[in-house]
Image (tube, rainbow, N blue to C red):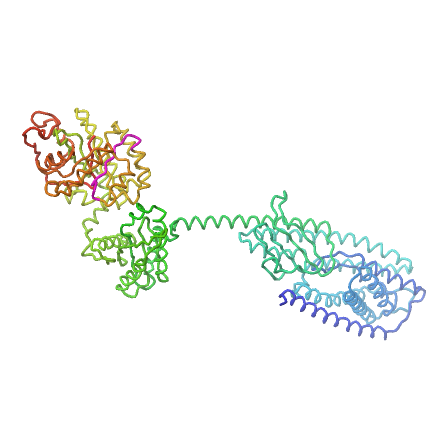
């Protein structure tokens, strides 16, 4: 199949043949007219010398050209009108036409032009000379006189006829070659042409006037010298003008190449190069080592853009330039200019070509650099909004998309959020390793993505939590149907390392709220998900009636900042006692919120709200500061007691937390080993890697660590093997059943044996009675806390109780077990409770 460029060339060639044929026919008609004109030589003028002079002058005038290249053709500013008009003033029209044709023919043969161009040039010479001769005959020119008659008006009209006929023949030809409107071709260098016409007309008038008044034919020998002088002056002006315009076009083209898109650079370069260098075709062979591409174009536009093997090398005369930087460090390929006929570039044109090629190479390199920056920016933007493990959108992308969907009304349908949490997923990581866990998460993400409908967004929030934004739902009930369908995709087993695993998940569904935005939608979906987990169902839809976070609790979230600023959070302390001697060995810090309207709130009432509010760091710092202050006051009073502070798992995920704890210890001048941080074993497992780094930093600094509620989780031993703790706290459920349940007693005994082998301390929580104390002591547990010894109290009251002691012994709250003594009980307090984490003995 032929290319569009080849078809355009065929059309142009056909138009040129037709037009040249028309000009030749008109010239033949003009020649017939010339043959009918009378031939009356001027007396006293040698005919042969006159014809030779006219012919030689025509050849000389044609050789004096100022070329302006248009494609492979040259638009020449020549002086052929001068010898022809002078000849018409001296000799009969047929002779002059014959001499002009002979001079034009000799000139074209010397140029070695193809026959078609020679025929066209001769035909144009016949037409212009005939037109001028007919005008002079009509003006009454008489060749019978001894001297030529000087008629400036007739000569001016004859010159105008020559110019008009020449333009009528030449402009359509150039319009066909350039595929441009005739008007644009006529306007090209119009001012230069007008100035040239004026000079040539003035030369004709001066020569004819001299001949008319002097009457000596030998004066014709001065005509070439005069023409040469005027030509040199005029050609310099023309060349200066052309070069200036050429540099301006080159500058505009180079500026146009300063675009970031590589394709646009190559396309612009191909078309602009065709315009600047008047090439019939431009080819850019772009091959920088990473790609091999060819772009071909003409002035009108791009004709080919594709792989190099698919682009044939253009025919014709080629002028090439390397696309490389000035130092040769980078090469982008080659620029090729094609011309139909042979063209030799001047030194100026070669320099201009090298300049354009260097600018094109720079533009290509800049476009590639911009594309690379855009690629990196796109990758960074994608990484910021997508999960690296599954490739799914992350929490940030989910929030952005959900906020936008809520703002525009969910696109005309109902908007819902499905929050999914995998059940017991941490067992996969603990048993098979994180690589297997990652494989499971990727497969879960893929299945959820496949089950999603167009317009839905599947995201991974972190860990084993996924979220699906359901959009365009026709009815609220469709949310539950879609959720069940998506979770059903997880029923099929997942193969990991040759093992078949079954994944169970629970999903919470929340419809878009009227107020509260995406945060409230996420909260409701989270509430619904935990409702599904507690009820053992696959999915649950949020219902306000079952939401334990009532309006009063939601209001607390907006008051947290003020509570921290006004120090509404206070800390009570519950002593930890040696079960054998009754001596206080440490104390656990329990936070309370003294709310102006709601009274004393326990951690169960506000801790979850604090963790979700963004005020966790300020809250934890306030509790830690009060705890260390109390520890310092006790030490000054003679009771050097460690203080145990509960730590939220979210605090451990904060990379600034260890440094904040150590800074607070330094500010309060409390030794690091006087602080015990209590960790919830059931809440830290899913983020073990991050938690391990934070805890190792604290432990290395001397801070002691305790594992709370030991034995209540499903993987206590795996947690213990990874978290560097000093103490274990037995969950209160085992303590309550120690007297009646052999199983509970066995768990406590095994915990004590394990702690002894690891050189850890064991503390029993929730000791309520003397029988429990005795049973725990017999099982090897040496420390405990509970209402048997004291309820939580302020730092000052605890110091007073320590000073008062039991049986006159300061620091003792109960009689030793080998004596028959009573337990000292402190006054009951209305507000009581414990935080989510406990403490250990020193």
Q: Residue at x 70, y 50 (%)?
A: 350
Is 666 above or below relative to 490? above
Estimate the x, y position of residue 413 in percent, counting from the top left: 31, 64
Looking at the image, which is closer to me, 460 or 56?
Answer: 460
Q: Position of residue 61 (x, y in %)?
A: 81, 59
> Quick check: 780 above or below 601?
above
- Residue 52 painted magenta: no
- Tell how many labels: 0
Image quarter in which the N terminus is found: bottom right
Rendering coords of residue 39 (x, y %): 89, 71
Q: Residue at x 75, y 51 (%)?
A: 236
- Which image quadrant for residue 407? bottom left
Quadrant of the image occupied by residue 402? bottom left
Q: Residue placed at 61% from the left, 43% from the top?
A: 329
Instruction: Between residue 377 and residue 294, name the one nearer to us.
Output: 294
Q: Is residue 293 left or right of residue 568?
A: right
Image vertical order of residue 180 relative to residue 833, above or below:
below
Image coordinates of residue 361 in percent, x first then y, are 60, 49
On the rendered structure, is 25 left or right of 46?
left
Identify which residue, 188 or 102, lies in the foreground. Answer: 102
User: Can residue 708 be found in the magenta stretch?
Assistant: yes
Which region is colored magenta? 699-712
Quarter of the image containing the C terminus?
A: top left
């Amino acid at each position: 199949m032929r290319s569009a460029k080849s078809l355009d060339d065929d059309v142009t060639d056909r138009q040129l043949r037709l037009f040249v044929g028309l000009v030749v026919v008109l010239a033949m008609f003009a020649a017939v007219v010339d043959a009918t004109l009378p031939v009356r030589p001027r007396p006293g003028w040698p005919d042969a010398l006159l014809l030779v002079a006219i012919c030689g002058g025509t050849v000389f005038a044609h050789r004096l050209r100022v070329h302006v290249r248009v494609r492979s053709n040259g638009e020449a500013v020549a002086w052929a009108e001068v010898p022809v008009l002078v000849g018409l003033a001296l000799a009969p029209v047929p002779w002059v036409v014959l001499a002009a044709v002979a001079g034009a023919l000799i000139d074209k043969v010397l140029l070695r032009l193809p026959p078609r161009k020679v025929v066209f040039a001769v035909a144009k010479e016949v037409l212009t000379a005939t037109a001028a001769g007919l005008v002079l005959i009509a003006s009454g020119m008489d060749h019978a006189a001894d001297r030529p008659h000087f008629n400036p008006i007739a000569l001016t009209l004859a010159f105008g006829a020559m110019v008009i006929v020449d333009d009528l023949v030449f402009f359509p030809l150039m319009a066909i070659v350039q595929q441009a409107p005739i008007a644009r071709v006529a306007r090209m260098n119009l001012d230069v042409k007008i100035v040239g016409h004026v000079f040539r007309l003035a030369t004709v008038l001066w020569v004819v006037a001299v001949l008319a008044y002097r009457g000596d034919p030998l004066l014709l020998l001065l005509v070439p010298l005069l023409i040469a002088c005027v030509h040199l002056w005029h050609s310099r002006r023309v060349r200066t003008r052309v070069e200036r315009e050429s540099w301006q076009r080159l500058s505009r083209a180079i500026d146009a190449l300063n675009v970031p898109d590589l394709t646009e650079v190559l396309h612009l370069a191909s078309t602009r190069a065709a315009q600047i260098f008047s090439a019939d075709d431009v080819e850019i062979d772009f091959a920088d080592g990473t790609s091999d591409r060819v772009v071909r174009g003409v002035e009108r536009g791009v004709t080919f853009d594709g792989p190099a093997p698919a682009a044939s090398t253009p025919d014709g005369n080629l002028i090439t330039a390397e696309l490389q930087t000035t130092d040769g460090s980078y090469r982008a390929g080659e620029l090729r200019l094609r011309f139909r006929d042979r063209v030799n570039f001047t030194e100026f044109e070669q320099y201009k070509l090298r300049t354009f090629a260097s600018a094109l190479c720079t533009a290509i390199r800049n476009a590639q650099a911009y594309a690379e920056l855009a690629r990196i920016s796109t990758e960074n933007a994608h990484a910021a909004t997508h999960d690296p493990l599954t490739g799914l959108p992350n929490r940030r992308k989910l929030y952005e998309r959900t906020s936008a969907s809520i703002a525009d009304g969910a696109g005309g349908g109902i908007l819902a959020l499905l929050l999914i949490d995998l059940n017991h997923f941490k067992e996969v990581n603990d048993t098979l390793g994180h690589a297997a866990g990652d494989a499971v998460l990727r497969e879960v993400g893929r299945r959820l993505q496949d089950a999603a409908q167009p317009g839905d967004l599947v995201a991974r929030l972190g860990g084993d939590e996924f979220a699906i934004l359901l959009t365009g739902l026709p009815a609220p009930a469709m949310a539950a149907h879609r959720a069940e369908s998506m979770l059903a995709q997880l029923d099929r087993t997942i193969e990991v390392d040759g093992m078949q695993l079954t994944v169970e998940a629970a999903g919470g569904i929340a419809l878009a709220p009227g107020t509260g935005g995406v945060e409230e939608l996420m909260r409701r979906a989270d509430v619904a998900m935990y409702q599904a987990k507690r009820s053992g169902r696959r999915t649950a839809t949020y219902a306000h009636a079952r939401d334990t976070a009532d309006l009063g609790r939601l209001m607390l979230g907006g008051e947290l900042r003020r509570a921290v600023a006004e120090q509404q959070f206070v800390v009570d302390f519950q002593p930890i006692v040696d079960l054998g001697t009754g001596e206080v060995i440490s104390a656990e810090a329990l936070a309370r919120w003294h709310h102006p309207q709601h009274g004393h709130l326990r951690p169960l009432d506000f801790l979850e709200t604090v963790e979700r509010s963004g005020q966790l760091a300020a809250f934890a710092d306030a509790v830690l500061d009060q705890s260390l202050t109390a520890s310092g006051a006790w030490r000054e009073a003679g009771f050097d007691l460690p203080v145990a502070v509960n730590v939220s798992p979210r605090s451990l995920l904060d990379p600034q937390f260890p440094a904040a704890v150590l800074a607070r210890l330094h500010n309060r001048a409390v030794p690091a080993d006087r602080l015990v941080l209590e960790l919830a074993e059931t809440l830290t497992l899913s983020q073990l890697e991050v938690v391990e780094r934070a805890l190792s930093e604290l432990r290395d600094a001397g801070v002691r660590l305790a594992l709370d509620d030991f034995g209540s989780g499903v993987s206590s031993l795996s947690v213990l093997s990874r978290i560097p703790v000093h103490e274990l706290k037995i969950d209160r459920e085992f303590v309550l059943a120690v007297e009646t349940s052999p199983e509970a007693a066995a768990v406590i005994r095994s915990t004590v044996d394990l702690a002894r082998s690891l050189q850890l301390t064991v503390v029993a929580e929730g000791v309520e009675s003397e029988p429990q104390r005795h049973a725990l002591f017999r099982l090897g547990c040496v420390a405990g806390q509970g209402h048997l010894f004291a309820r939580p109290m302020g730092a000052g009251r605890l110091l007073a109780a320590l000073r008062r002691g039991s049986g006159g012994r300061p620091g003792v709250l109960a009689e030793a077990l080998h004596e028959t003594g009573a337990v000292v009980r402190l006054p009951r307090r209305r507000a009581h409770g414990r935080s989510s984490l406990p403490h250990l003995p020193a």
